[in-house]
Image: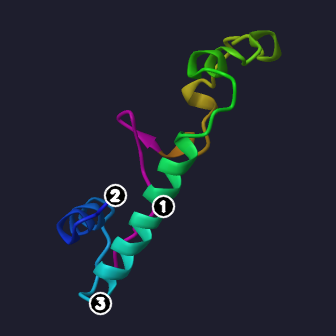
Amino acid sequence: MKVSYEQIRDIARLARLELSQKEVPLLAAEFEELLGFFDCVSGIECGISADECRNSVQMSSLREDEPLASLKEEELPGGDRRRGGMYRVGRVVK
């Protein structure tokens, strides 16, 4: 599958990456290689359908959710620094 430079720039923007002009073609080639691999793998017959694969997890192996008691506000660390429902913290900006 062909990946355009514009698509690479969009992906980089979404990932908050700054790419140089030299990096865009390199990343496009890597993406094309990955997509080709995924396309190849998706065509492999393994004898099990996607639904069977999803349903193969044994639910009995998972534990049941059990609600536990939560901490009271008085038990929270730094509870002595509360004022008006908020916590005082140390200054972080000089």
Residue that extends furthest to the right in the rendered view of this protein: 61
Earlier in the chain: of badge 1 and badge 3, it is: 3
Q: Is residue 61 left or right of residue 5?
A: right
Q: Residue under circle 1?
A: 34
Q: Residue under circle 3?
A: 22
- Using the image, determine if residue 18 lies above or below residue 54: below
Which residue is found at the position 38% from the left and 33% from the top?
85
Cα distance in 3D space between marks 2 and 3: 21 Å
Looking at the rendered structure, the kind of residue marked 1 is: Leu
In the image, residue 75 lies at what x, y percent? 64, 31
Label 3's element?
A: loop
Which residue is found at the position 34% from the left and 57% from the top?
1
Query: For mark 3, does the 10 Å Cα neighbourhood hold few (<14), some (14 to 19), or many (20 or more) residues?
Result: few
Q: Is residue 23 left or right of residue 49?
A: left
Label 2's element?
A: loop
Q: Quadrant of residue 66?
A: top right
Label 1's element?
A: helix
Cα distance in 3D space between marks 1 and 2: 9 Å
Q: Residue under circle 2?
A: 1
Earlier in the chain: of badge 2 and badge 3, it is: 2
- Using the image, determine if residue 27 lies above or below residue 35: below
Q: Which residues are magenta?
A: 82-94
Q: Quadrant of residue 72?
A: top right
Looking at the rendered structure, the kind of residue marked 2 is: Met
Which residue is found at the position 55% from the left and 39% from the top?
79
Looking at the rendered structure, the kind of residue marked 3 is: Lys
Query: For mark 1, does the 10 Å Cα neighbourhood hold few (<14), some (14 to 19), or many (20 or more) residues?
Result: few
